[in-house]
């Protein structure tokens, strides 16, 4: 699998560990039960339930392998070492759209932790990339699906 190092917040790493644990225990037990039930129904060569359960098992094992690979290359980010003089991963940055004056506050996180509903923006997204390295007062012109948008960085915290 990949050897790409991914950086996580404590919360994100814990979520990843919990998901992996859940899949290894409850997920595998559920699949084993489904296979056993399908096997009890007779001839396996014409048993669609058995085939579906075996397919689900394959998907589950692939997901477990993917999460194990992520965990092997996961690194915990220490918030104490975040430099708030410029935008970096784990920065909570407030930006203002220069055209319409709308302000937003996002936390920049790894691609795997990104979630717009909780205002966690990936450092690999167009806006995340455009903000990295900027300081308070700097402007960033970022290409978005709606066209180019100019943002001003108004605040950087942790």
Image (tube, rainbow, N blue to C red):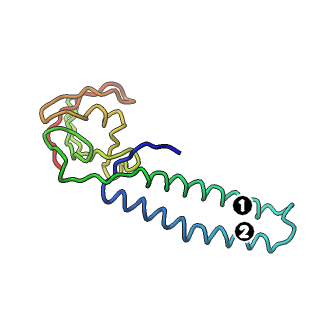
Callout 1 crowding tier (Cα within 10 Å): few <14, some 14–19, many ≥20: some
Query: Vertical placement of 150 versus 36: above or below?
Result: above
**In-front residue for pair 116/78:** 78
Residue at position x 19%, y 47% from top? 82
Residue at position x 85%, y 71% from top? 42
* Side (left or right) of 117 relative to 39: left
**In-front residue for pair 139/111:** 111
Labels 1 and 2 touching (C-beta < 8 A): yes
Q: Position of residue 102 (x, y in %)?
A: 22, 38
The label on residue 35 is 2
Residue at position x 73%, y 59% from top? 52
Q: Position of residue 62 (x, y in %)?
A: 59, 54
Residue at position x 22%, y 31% from top? 151
Q: CA distance from mark 1 to mark 2?
A: 7 Å
Q: Which residue is mark 1?
A: 54
Q: Position of residue 44 (x, y in %)?
A: 84, 65
Which quadrant of the view contains residue 38?
bottom right
Q: Secondary structure at mark 2?
A: helix
Lower sequence index among marks 1 and 2: 2
């Amino acid at each position: 699998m990949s050897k790409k190092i991914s950086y996580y917040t404590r919360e994100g790493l814990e979520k990843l560990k919990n998901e992996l644990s859940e899949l290894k225990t409850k997920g595998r037990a559920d699949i084993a039960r489904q296979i056993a039930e399908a096997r009890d129904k007779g001839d396996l060569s014409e048993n669609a339930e058995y085939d579906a359960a075996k397919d689900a098992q394959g998907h589950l094992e692939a997901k477990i392998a993917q999460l194990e690979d992520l965990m092997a290359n996961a690194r915990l980010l220490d918030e104490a070492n975040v430099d708030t003089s410029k935008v970096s991963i784990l920065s909570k940055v407030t930006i203002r759209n220069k055209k319409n004056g709308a302000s937003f506050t996002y936390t920049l996180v790894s691609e795997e932790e990104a979630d717009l509903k909780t205002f966690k923006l990936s450092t690999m997204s167009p806006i995340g990339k455009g903000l990295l390295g900027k300081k308070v007062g700097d402007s960033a012109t970022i290409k978005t699906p709606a066209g180019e948008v100019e943002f001003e960085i108004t605040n950087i915290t942790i």
